[in-house]
Amino acid sequence: MITRPLELASQLRPEPRNFDLLFLVNGGLIVLFFFLFGSSFVLAPGIALNFQMQEVAGARSGAAPTTHRITVKPSGLIFTDKGPVDVEQLGNWLKGEAVKTRQASLLIIASKDVLGGRITEIANVAHAAGFVNVQWAAEEPTLEKH
């Protein structure tokens, strides 16, 4: 009995060479380009920025240069260079940054609606992490009143 009457298998081209290495190189290049040109904020949801800092008389006279900065929103969100963090993650980030920087100082940019207790908590975490100086950003009051 004939099981393969047309013998089609003999008419096929031979299997191609193995290109697994080429596929791995292409995949590696794609991943490399995502790391080089990608952003951690590409797919992040948008946040409204109605941001107003506290007005304090003499704010400019107390200004000092800082090495690091964070932004604190009234909702409790804390933003670093790496994105949003909570207080525990902030402590770990500050410890890592304090080790890297000599005489590390922190600028806390907080909205005027952020409670003073929250600022004090963050300042205590920064001092415990090894930051020498902590500044609270404020604006000089303007003469114009609406």
Image: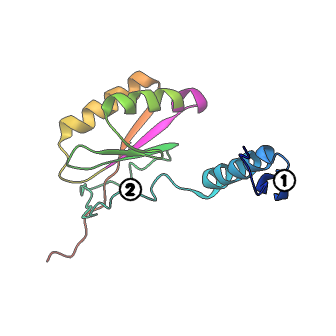
Q: The disc labelled 2 sits on which kind of residue? A: Ala
Mark pair 2, 1: CA separation: 56 Å
Q: Position of residue 63 (x, y in %)?
A: 42, 50
Work out whether 115 lies above or below 7: above
Picture mark count: 2
Q: Earlier in the sequence, mark 2 or mark 1?
A: 1
10 Å crowding of disc 1: few (<14), some (14-19), many (20+):
few
**Residue 12 locus on image (x, y percent):** 81, 57
In the rendered image, the quadrant that contains the N terminus is top right
Q: Residue at x 44, y 39 (%)?
A: 106
What residue appears at the point 85 percent right and 48 percent down from the top-left corner? 17
Residue at image point 29% right, 60% down: 47
Say if mark 2 contacts mark 1, CB within 8 Å: no
Q: Is residue 31 covered in magenta?
A: no
Neighbourhood count class around disc 2 (C-alpha, 10 Å): few under 14, some 14–19, many 20 upward: few
Instruction: Establish if 119 lies above or below 10.
Output: above
Q: Nearer the viewer, residue 141 or 137?
A: 137
Q: What number is the disc on residue 139?
A: none
Q: For residue 106: magenta? A: yes
The residue that mark 2 highlights is 44
**Residue 42 placement (x, y as % from top left):** 46, 59
Position in image of residue 70 (x %, y %): 39, 45
* Front position among marks 2 and 1: 1
Disc assigned to residue 10: 1
| Residue 132 visible in the picture | no
Residue 130 in sight from this viewpoint? yes
Q: In terms of depth relative to the viewer, which is nearer, 106 or 100?
A: 100
Question: For the residue labelled by badge 1, is the local secondary structure a helix, a strand or a loop?
Answer: helix
* Magenta stretch in the rendered image: 97-109
The image quarter containing residue 134 is top left
Tag 1: amino acid: Ser
